[in-house]
Image: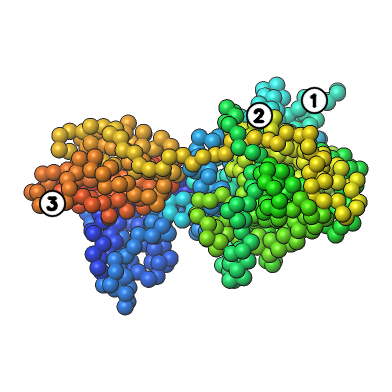
Amino acid sequence: MSSHDAQAGTVLTVVHEPDGAAPGSALVFELCGPLGTAQAEAVAARIANRHRAYSVALEEEAGRYLVRLSRAGAAAGREPVPLTAELLADLLQPPCLGTIPVTGHQRELLLAAVNRPGAAGRHIEQLHWSWTGPLDIGRFTAAWQSVTDREVVLRTSFDWTGAPRLVLHERAAVEVVRHRHTTASWNDLLRRDRAREFALHRPGLLRLTLLDGPPGPGATGPAATTRILLSYPHALLDERGAQLLVREFYRAYLADGVVPGGERRPDIRDHVEWLRGQDTDVARRFWATAAPPAHAAVSPGRPGGRTRNTGPGRIQRRLRPHQTARLRSWAAAWGAGESSALHAVWALLLYRAAGVPGPAPVSFGMHLSGRDLMLRGAADIPGLLGNPLPVTVTVDPTAPLVDLLRQVRDAALDLSAYPWVSGDLIREWSGRNPGDRLTDTLVRFDTRPELPQALRSELNAQGVRVDLPQSVSSDTSLPVTLVARHDSQGGLTLTATHDRAGLSDADASGTLSQCMHLLRVLPDHHDERVTVAQVLDLLRAGEVPLVARQEPGPRGFALAVLRAGEPRSDVIGLVNVPGVPPGAYDLLLSEYDGPERIVSLALDDADGLPPPSGLRELGLREPGPRQTPDTGRRLVLCGCGPAGRTAYAIARDAPYRTDGPTTVIMTGTGDAAGSARALLRGLESVRARRVNRRRV
């Protein structure tokens, strides 16, 4: 095993004492193990390579490794070195092959997953399919490992210490577990698997679970049919990317467990380079006017009370093949596709739910996979290349329905040039607030890659029959996500995933039924003079759904004393923000036996700061005459992952006095146990430093 593999799960620590950010001052960080001289030199070299505006020096002092950063060249002596998110993340990055920034949509999905750790299963995607015939589990596992060795996206982990990014590793292991049909039911297996969260900070973000079926009539060997479940984080792959990996796995299985050829290129690294080369000026001008206006109708229902339910709901409806063919022909007669017919119907439902008279803008999300980018080989790159983009059209009750159909068609064509634009950029370019939700619903029209006939024939030659993998999604980041896809018989299947806390199962079912009703009857209307109002009148007997709009929770700061400590002892402040590993500070409390007073400083925003009045409750003094050194309390602020920069900002800017330097302990991202151990190493270093100062 390489050193990269051995230390992939290590959580590193730095100890820092802000010096008031005086002009020309350097930033000095103590690197806290487990690091030897070679590893400390590697950290310093990484900082020097990635932050060329600074002069980087590594010093060894009584067994401690200090990294000193100062401005280089003409900038030296002017301004202090800022502790940026990228700099902190690079200091705390364990050994790896490198890092790449996440895409805009990945950032949103990642932060949703790490900021809502209690929402088990909401951020996990699943594919499942049936395998009929002989299955060699050794070759099966080797084939998936070969795919992982070839695809860099499967050897990544996530880091959200600073600016969120993907960390690239030399190797990652694929988890494969096989169950007998007598040990679990399929539904139980799906539920248990979804409840298992991925450790996003570690590589190996893919797992497979196999459930053998009962042997066929007269069978004496392995089960005739095995159901296969593939699970992965939503922030890692989209469904098309996962389907591409399944196809690659088949090739490896047929080749005795090894994918022919070397590592795939292009891959997600090439996609990032392509993104860096995009000219944003045209996109900025487009989204300055194309973003949803603040008064657009976006909700799938009218305001209602809470449903008293929780978790994701999933409802499915189907157009029969002949109905699907009629819808496709009807849309084609007006110069549009069936996806435009679905978008037009969804716009009608949103307009109806708004209950406004006259013309009104309506907005919903449309998912673009990004597989048609002007990037060589983009269609076959597993990853998360696309984005959900907001579509805005004007619904006018007096206008012909075909005008609305052409509106959504043209809007979709306009968006096709911008699958790389994230919601954050759209908010920025259109003057919206950073936390604004652009839409409440998302419509996705999926086209799954078919299994090549040659590949299917090779599997059949070995007695193996497989069906097309089916998706089981529970993404409820929006109140409703509607996914449309064609089944093997040519029918159009619609699957609605909804947040049951905001939209009841009955209301979600009613909405989907109304959508299907319109899709069935639209082909009966061949007259281009049929108006929007006439089509809406077809729904007059249906109830308008009720939606409990999610209100933002209270924002602010909370301080709690966790351990009183000894009289006049120092204060340890545990800074808690979204993204801190749950349980890390609890483990620290159980392991640390120092005399300090320990308090929790909880903020609901990693970029926020506590009010001065809150900091006074730490027991520290207001600005004033300095006491005799080492006679009063001093402050040690601890921050895991994204809380590190917050702890640094508090120590640098807080308007109060401490008797001696305020110390900040910052760790990388990890699990609760790894983060607690990293903080303990930092506290031990601070304690040793304090003892040495007293001796001097």
Q: Are marks 3 and 1 in contact (CB under 8 Å)?
A: no
Q: Of the residues tagged 3 and 1, which is closer to the observer? A: 3
Q: Residues within 10 Å of mark 3 (few under 14, many from 20)?
A: few
- Of marks 3 and 1, which one's residue comes earlier in the chain? 1
Q: Are marks 3 and 2 in contact (CB under 8 Å)?
A: no
Q: CA distance from mark 3 to mark 1?
A: 82 Å
Q: Residue at x 34, y 49 (%)?
A: 609
Q: CA distance from mark 2 to mark 1?
A: 19 Å
Judged from the image, the secondary structure of the residue bearing numbered disc 3 is loop
The one nearer the camera, 604 or 432, is 432
Q: Amino acid at mark 1?
A: Pro
Q: Amino acid at mark 2?
A: Leu
Q: Residues within 10 Å of mark 2 (few under 14, many from 20)?
A: some
Q: Residue at x 26, y 44 (%)?
A: 613
Q: Quadrant of residue 462?
A: top right
The one nearer the camera, 501 or 244, is 501
Relative to 416, is 455 on the left or the right?
Answer: right
Residue 336 visible, this orientation: yes
Q: Residue at x 45, y 44 (%)?
A: 579
Relative to 495, is 78 on the left or the right?
Answer: left
- Note whether 520 is above or below 280 in the view shown: above
Q: CA distance from mark 3 to mark 2?
A: 63 Å
Give percent across and percent down for residue 111: 51, 47
Q: According to the image, label 1 marks what residue? A: 215
Q: According to the image, label 3 marks what residue? A: 624
Q: Residue at x 32, y 46 (%)?
A: 610
Q: Residues within 10 Å of mark 1 (few under 14, many from 20)?
A: some
Give percent across and percent down for residue 546: 65, 35
